[in-house]
Amino acid sequence: MAYIDNISNTYGSPPGEYHPGVAATQGNMSSDPYIMQANHIAPVPSPVPLPDTCSYYYSGIGPNSGYGVDVAAIGGTTPAGGVVGIGFARMRSVRTTANAGGNMNMNTDNLNISNNAPPLPPILRPYHFQYHHFSPRLSQTRFRCICLPNPWWNIYANDGYKHCDGYLGVWRFPFNVRMSQYNASLRTSLSGQDSQIPEQQMQISTGLHFFPDAQNNDFRNAQITNVVGNLNIIKGDSGLCSDTKKITADMIASATPAVPIVFKGREDLVEQGVAILCQEALRFLAILGAGGMGKTSLALHILNSDLVQNKFGERCYFIPCELFEDAESLVQGLIHVMELTMQENQSKQKVLFNHLQSTHGDLLIVFDNFETPWNYGDSRIGVKNLLEKIAKYGKVSLIVTMRGPDGPGDIPWERLGDQSGIPTLLPVPAKEAFKAFAGNKLQISDDSESQLDSLLYQLEYVPLAIRLSAQHVKRVPLKTLIRMWEKDKTSILVEQTEPGRLTSVSFSIDLSIQIFRIEGRTLELLSTLSFLPDGIPLWVEHLDQMFPGEGLSVNVSTLIESSLIYDQNKGLKMLAPVREHVHSKYPIGQADLDQLEMFYGLFLENLPRNETEAQPGLQLHINNIEKIFKAQISSGHSKTSHILAVNILDRFRRFASVSMGLIDLILEDNQNIKKDDDVDLKLMKANHLRWMGRFQDAKDQVMSVKDCINEEENISQSEADILGRCFDILESIYYSQAQYEKAIDMNLQAQKYFKQSKNQWAQANSMRWLGNIYLGQAKYKEASELFSEAQWLFQQIGNELGVAECLKRIGDIFRMQGRNDEAIKMVSDAQKHFQTFGNQMRAAECLWSLGELCRDQGKYDEATEMIMKCQKQFEEIGDKRGVAHCLEILSLIYGDQAHYDEAVEMLSNAQMQYQITGSIVEVAWCYEYVGVTYGHQGQYEKAKEAFTEALELLKRFPGEKYKIGCTLLRFGDLFLKVKYYGEARRRYEEARNVFDSHGQLEKYVDECSWALAKLDEAISQ
């Protein structure tokens, strides 16, 4: 009797002796063993001491012992036979004993066989074979084994773990064994004789199975360790159960989750799923999507619905497929949950199918997490066959949940959700779910609501991420949780327990990577996608340029099947939790990052000159462009001209924040920047700051350039041009704040320097800007003269865009003067020019003016249509001020039609937009309109408050005589209506004085005189 431990040291008689690497059996014959050997991979530590016994039935060695081995190899020669055997298994406790009378003496450090070995017994036949059913990798390995027909070996496998299925000495390895990495070779050595027995003399024994019923072994991720010196065994850690035969009904019940209590935003999907299952013609429901999307929860709620329960009753069966790896194990699981009785030597599939055939009522089976058996090893064909056979029974309905975009097999599945599977939650139910998971630990306030909105947006409303993040709120404040997410990303999306698919987002993602065997270039594509916030838009067109390589379609197909990415609007996208985890664990390589930068450099250079055509395509990629260029500039690896990229982006106002971020990074390392580029970037940034309403920051940026040039000395032509540009930006800063006198001073300075630099375009443009200032002051005569002169200059230099801008402004003057027909013609002509040039912002401004003209003519439907179209264009551009203008005009349209509530709502929204852009005068003007509207509704106190607020704001802008005068005039109308005659007179007289001081508002002076006359008439009555 001999016992082999997990490093093939042996224990045997005489009692008390233990010799590492030596096998001994009772008797006095020297052993001449046959050795099976594989290459040594890793050393194994010495075993713990074992009991002094050679009896198999002794409790310290036999079935009840606490010791275990992974593979046994025993050698010995007796009249009955001498053999060394080998088995491969993933097991916790295995006992191998041999009844081999005789004395074996085998030192694993010296495999020379003694010369006194007897001849090979006739019953012992070496067998040499190549197993042709192995995987392509394993089929390269040749095995030689020994057949022993007599059942001399006793094999005991504790805890039910599988072994190789085969006769003693002839090992049948399971198909999913992959051993190429181990370079295993097995050989048989015979002392004193030729071990190469002709194949025609070889026989396969029909004796005892060495490891019976082991076709489902799990050897994935196995490693070889030392056995009998150089003989190796496999240890695996696949994460899957490797003995599905031992899975019990209780184990299945324990793995079946309860119906979730917190379940938000899926009511429509539950209703659709129930409707599918309860229709006669539809029996197969697929719930597909990425890990963590709540597929199992959805299936359980469908299963638990009243209609489904009424139809199927107790014939509803839930199979947690993560426990099963192939068709045979799935059948075993179904037999367990259906509580079917098995007879000896009866086919399990036959028992199952007989039950499905004979069932009297409708029957529902839920295969949850079906991706496990579907993608395990080479089990797909068997699993597919099983599933399709089950589906053929007319009484059977199926629900399958699995990762991926498509249901398994050739079954007409009805899918829930969209083409990528079930969607993420909508914002409102996502917030409800978070609050429900967090419980009363979440303290609600205005700040916390906005913080929670921000967090859920960053999590992209993924259900599992919401649940796991909400758990932290029970221990830390929400603000701290947000900081944790920003710093640690998916590492916070885990419960304080053993990681699993339902307790860790990262585990769930890694499980998908493992199940779908994502490696090599496919994994590199996944890491590249994780770096790109916008994914790969229009991937069929761009993928091979962004990520060169062969077989890209196969790589994409694998990733889509895993649901780690999804195809949306012809682009490849990734959910935020997946993106963050993959990027953290598998960061993009520098070569791939360089390729992306080169692609986007060319992409920007090739954009259409027409901004209207270029912006939609650029919008799809803008976040990728920002991240890639920032990464390359920061690391010093930039391969393209980032300044050229910034200059191109500067054409698009919508992406001002992106341009500014890149400018800041470039300016931080200004050692390698040319002086001209440095000036251009700083003034470009100042323009963006001004446009964003950050007026003081914009002014400081301009002054940092201006102060570098001494205006008192003789300056060069290029320096004069720089100074002209500085004053031009300062003018626009003051104009945006309605500080018209300062704006005029800056304009005159700019024109002086532009004349010195001989920049004709800049001279004409400054003249146009001065016309804008006069138009803002309602000085129509001066404004019209300047626009006409600027138009002539633009024509002289062939600048058609400048000509169109002047035409539009002249049309606005005609509109202010009530010359509507002339205004419509002028503005329409300008609009056509802007559309031709692709200048979306100017075209939108023309549409706004035309909408205002329609309103003046009482054409409210046309006006509304034009203004709403204009608003959409401003939103696409990112022009908040333009959006506010549209909201303001819409409020006037509603007010003209006595829709006062809608008018007030529009004005409130417009005020918010104006405040964001720092347009205080426009905020005050909205208050004036609100006061008028409340007056029409008879809400006089609210109207009085609005007028008072407007006048308070306008005090800071004494140049706004038109707006101040109008507000006073309307305030007087309110007091007249409520018969506060003294207050009304005071407001009318103040308004008349303001209009009169302007010099060009005689029309409004007359209106004030008419109002005073009306007041006197009211008093006299």
Image (cartoon, rainbow, N blue to C red):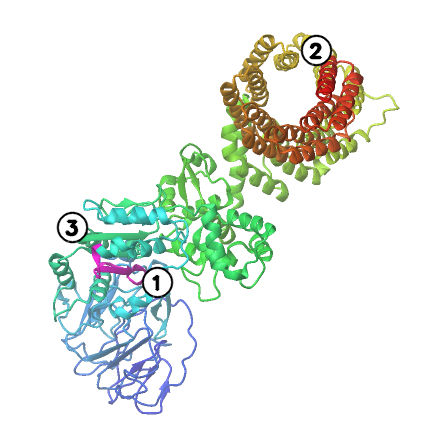
Query: Which of marks 1 and 2 precedes in the sequence?
Result: 1
Q: Residue 463: image x %, image y %? A: 43, 52
Which residue occupies 42% across, 79% down? 46
- 243 to 452, vertically: above or below: below
Q: Residue 771: image x %, image y %? A: 72, 16
Q: Is residue 741 visible?
A: yes
Q: Residue furthest right?
A: 712
Splitting the image into 4 quarters, where does residue 382 fall?
bottom left
- 175 to 124, vertically: above or below: above
Query: Which of marks 3 and 1 precedes in the sequence?
Result: 1
Tell me where the magenta segment starts and ends, as one range. Answer: 311-328
- Mark 1 vs mark 3, foreground winner is 1
User: Does dot 2 land on a helix, a strand or a loop?
Assistant: helix
User: Would you call the spot at circle 1 few (<14 residues within 10 Å), some (14-19), or many (20 or more)?
Assistant: few
The residue pinned by badge 3 equals 392
Q: Callout 1, which amino acid? A: Ala
Query: Which of marks 3 and 2 precedes in the sequence?
Result: 3
